[in-house]
Image: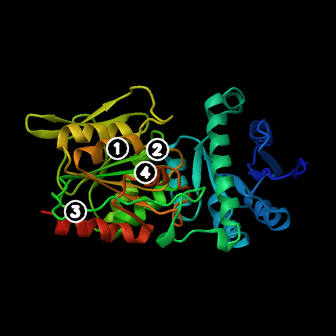
Amino acid sequence: MEAAQASTGDAIRVMVVDDSAVVRGLISRTLERDGEVVVVRTVSNGEQAVKQLAEVGADVVILDIEMPVMDGLTAIPKLLEVDPEVKIIMASTLTEKNAEVSIRAMQAGAADYIPKPSTSKELTGNQPFGDELLAKVKTLGRTVRKEKAPVAAKSTPATQHMPGGKPITLRPRPVVVPKPNILAVGSSTGGPQALFEFFKGLKGVIDVPIVVTQHMPPTFTTILAQHISRAANTPAQEAAEGDVLEPGKIYVAPGDYHMTIVERGGKHVVHLNQDPPENFCRPAVDPMLRSLVKAYGGKILVVILTGMGFDGQKGSEVVVKAGGMVVAQDEATSVVWGMPGAVAEAGLCSAVLPLKEIASHVATIFKKSV
């Protein structure tokens, strides 16, 4: 085990777990260029990580997948047994095998993943990787600190407030609601787990097309669609250019492409583009929602699940202005209450609910709408 820098003040405490000493060093230096973060340990396998978490603690663990003695996937439940509130970020290269393992890792309790450059040379000069890693570590680290705050300071779903004590204002639901002609879902950090739970609850009861934008890179979105299909027992696919939307099918935006929906010859068709990232993301939720308003008017139901940032807020404003509805995941069940918190704070939601209640609420909207 390598020497660790001492923790100072209220810095976010991070453990780096990777079998490559070079990668451990590079990740550690990347993290510690920010004064809010301190690396408390760097270790070479999952077994050491479990031992050191018990001894020194950490807010966030950066966890490699393939390691000797104990791999990352095996280590996750053991780490969470030591500290149920620790946030685990899987560090994975962009291969189909690692994408599959990363998604399984998130199902097992990992909070997020980071696409890792495949060589140490790429790691050294990869500014986007470092920026994304720091953003995720800081966001998740702050979430841990909030979760470990005294219980009295936490808000419950019934009396939920934004940071600073601002209450959520829900939009009144009209007496007569036109049946949505499409369901749109946006998510980011913690999204795969939330998507599986949400679609498992729906179990194919929605008879309109469903479009999903989850912040993920290429390869990962292909595997994500396969897992959603299994969880929902409903056809799900990574969207392709020219796909005609069909009722009851789920279309997942492919990594590195914005997914928009256009009307052609009386049909609604997928159009992909590589326009600049929005909200630092591609795919992004906002362009998807803007396109839906052009294609469907106000007959849209939007669900915003857990995620860092505020992607989906501006698009939801357009949806609501057109007469559509927005439902958000609540703070208590979100890994990060960034995206759902943004739409809730803006007063765009007709409901803000725990994850386990969203599917039944959505099903009710489709059953009672006219």
* CA–CA distance in space, label 1 to label 2: 20 Å
In percent of the image, x 62 and y 46: which residue is there? 136
Q: Position of residue 301 (x, y in %)?
A: 27, 54
Answer with left or right where residue 298 lies relative to residue 290.
left
The mark nearer the N terminus, 3 or 2, is 3
Circles 3, 4 touching at the beta carbon (< 8 Å): no
Badge 1 or badge 2: first in the primary sequence? 2
Q: Whole-percent x and y of residue 217?
A: 48, 40
Q: Which mark is residue 343?
A: 4
- Residue most toward the left? 265
- Label 2 residue SS: loop
In the rendered image, which residue does mark 3 sit on?
206
Mark 3, secondary structure of its residue: loop
**Of the numbered discs in the image, which one, if any, rests on residue 232?**
none
Distance from Cα at disc 3 to Cα at disc 1: 24 Å
| Disc 4 packing (10 Å; few <14; some 14–19; many ≥20) | many
Instruction: Please state which amino acid type lies under the numbered disc 3.
Output: Ile
